[in-house]
Amino acid sequence: MAPNHHLESKYRNSRMEFDKVYFWTDTIKDWKHLLKQDKYKDLIISSWQELIRRENIVIYAFVIMPNHLHVVWEMKEPNGKEMGHASFNKFTSHLIVKDLKINHPNVLPHFKVDEKERQYRIWQRDPLAILMDTKLKVEQKINYIHNNPLHERWNLASRPEEYPWSSAEFYESGKDEFGILTHYGERF
């Protein structure tokens, strides 16, 4: 790892500004493999679809892994009084907790927290946001994202475009099954 790489830093940069592109990593609390279930991946996609419909965000690339996700995106407009990523975390957390209460009550205690503002935490605090200010940086992160499912730790696909929960197929064939992607070439 590069010496100034701050992935492991105690205080990760999770702040984003409007009209700038970021590589963003959001991780499930305690690295639990909560996102193995497709219903939670679908929930993430539908949340992004709504934020795009409202013109709050633009998504250039993504991958949803069993315990984390990566997305290259841009915040365009506030969603009410908050940034799109905050709405995303709040909305997905609420729906996942609701589903866990009904369908997986034995899993719910793993996400219990002693915090004033919430009873359960689905996403870890301080997601990682890295500014993507050059085309080269964006291309490197998109390549990283698309190859994430192939990593020996995961072994979720043999080719990037075979993994259905990423933008790899979009960049291979132009097919956007979820209707959420904008080609990074339109921005850089």
Image (tube, rainbow, N blue to C red):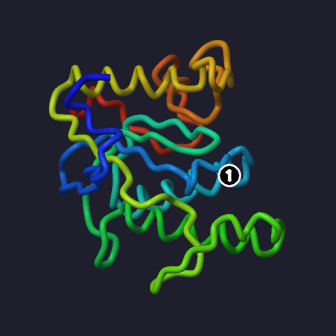
* Image spot of residue 140 (x, y percent): 32, 21
Specify the quadrant that holds the N terminus: top left
Horizontal side of residue 4 vs 141, given as left or right:
left
Specify the quadrant that holds the C terminus: top left
Q: Residue furthest top?
A: 158
* Image spot of residue 174 (x, y percent): 49, 24
Quarter-wise, where is residue 96 in the image? Answer: bottom right
**157, above or below 165, in the image:** above
Residue at 35%, 27% in the rendered image:
141
Residue at 71%, 44% in the rendered image:
36
Q: Residue furthest bottom?
A: 116
- Comparing 56 with 81, the one in front is 81
* Image spot of residue 64 (x, y percent): 56, 40
* Image spot of residue 3 (x, y percent): 22, 26
State the residue position of label 1. Answer: 34
Please give the count of numbered marks on the rendered protein.
1
Horizontal side of residue 94 vs 20, given as left or right:
right
